[in-house]
Image: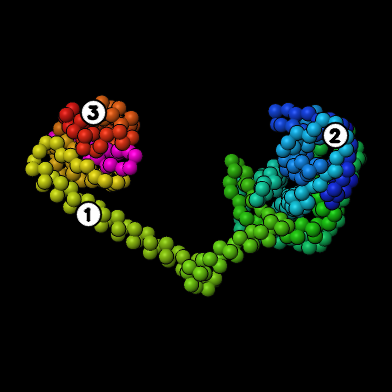
Amino acid sequence: MTRKLYYLDAYQMEFKSKVTNIDEDDRGPYIVLEETAFYPTGGGQPHDIGILNGIEVIDVEEVEGEIRHYTKEKFPDGIENVQGTIDSKRRIDHMQQHCGQHIISAVFHDQFEILTTSFHLGKNTVTIDLDTERLTDELVRRAEDQVNQIIRDNAPVESKWMSVDEASDYPLRKPLVVEGDVRLVIIPGIDYNGCGGTHPRFTGEVMAAKFLGWTKNKKQVRLEFVCGHRVLDKLGQKHRVLTELKRIVQKPESELVAEIGELIKSNKERDKQIADLEEQALKYEAKDIIANSQDKQVIQCVFKDRPIQTLQSLGKAIIEQAAYAYLILISEQEHQLQFVLAHGEDLDRNMNEVAKKTMPLIEGRGGGKPNFVQGGGKRLIDGAAFAERVKSLL
């Protein structure tokens, strides 16, 4: 079995090793080493990435008892030794997030009797599922304060290999499900947990933890958070957003929320006014179209680049006023035709049947109620010709 250097020293980012196998599987080419500092995916923690002899390592997995380093290109046969370099930024980040999760889970369990049921270390944020149906703002605030106090206390983070029987002498957070030896991660007085991940030597290296919010997930709660340098990244992102908002909305930061709320309210009112005016304009346009049709039973109009929503609104306005008429509205666009086919309440005709006979002309699709159909397709003929073909069926 490969010797796991990351358990001996999680801070070792460079190493040399002998090659024991070069092969490939459905994931791609891989190389197996006598010893490695590359951490494979496991226990909720993602794998390391880095370089082996100048070749990029893109994935690391433990398969059938061996650690496979999946590489961007296959190693040439005959390579006996490699020099490896771990992406230290990614490794330290994972150490901060994972240790932070231990502390957060410990605080929720010990202080609030809420168990953690799962853990996911994502690219941007981390989540844990908590065995409760709801949290309160006050509880979340108290938990976050306690977590950050533990981080500031700079408590030691230890790891020990021992038998399952020896591990049972510790106040474990959850029962062990392994046989043989187990690796126990210990933050004295705070957390005792079987864990195969990488961790810093002291809680202070986690730097800080910030809860980002929580959502209901089935009958549990999913808490989202960041630790370490990710807290600074989030702070930087939010600062850039606030700075840009203050440039657009020239108010002090403390007044931004209220000012933006007023702007949104004002815009909604303006949008409603515009919608009302557009509706009135469409009613007047509908009257003009009916007047110009000179009481013909088929009213047809071809427009340029009018949205289908406008055609629908205009069509409803027309058939409300012209109960005796069939209606054909076409919108010509650069590469497509859209249409509304309808009739007033004095007529009895299924417009879906008419649409089905004409849609092959534009390789179109559509449907609706028997008296009101909308659809569209490719602009294989012009709008006027399409309208005439529909009219011929009416």
The numbered mark at residue 79 is 2
For the stretch drawn in magenta, the main secondary structure is: strand
Secondary structure at badge 2 equals: loop
Expressed as whole percent of the image width and height from the top left, the position of residue 142 reads 68, 60
Secondary structure of the residue carrying tag 1 is: helix
The residues tagged by marks 3 and 1 sit, at their Cα atoms, a distance apart of: 30 Å
Numbered circle sitting on residue 392: none
Mark 2–mark 3 contact, CB under 8 Å?
no
211, 33: nearer the viewer? 33
Magenta span covers which residues?
329-346
Snapshot quadrant of residue 77:
top right
- Quadrant containing the C terminus is top left
In the rendered image, residue 223, in percent from the top left (x then y), is placed at 64, 50
Distance (Cα) linking label 2 and label 3: 73 Å
Do the residues bearing badges 3 and 1 touch, measured as CB atoms within 8 Å?
no
In the rendered structure, which amino acid carries the disc numbered 3?
A: Val
First in sequence, mark 2 or 1: give its number: 2
Marks 2/1: CA–CA distance? 79 Å
| Camera-nearest label, 2 or 3 | 2
Colour theme: rainbow
Tell me which amino acid carries mark 1: Gln
Residue to which mark 3 is pinned: 354
The residue to which callout 1 is attached is: 280
Q: Is residue 327 visible to the viewer in this orientation of the structure?
A: yes
**Vertical side of 169 occupied by 103: above or below:** below
Where is the N terminus found, in terms of image quarters?
Answer: top right
Q: Is residue 79 above or below residue 285?
A: above
Residue at image coords 71%, 31%: 28
> 181 or 38: which is nearer to us?
38
- Residue at 78% from the left image edge and 37% from the top image edge: 69
Magenta highlight on residue 330: yes
* Mark 2: amino acid: Ile
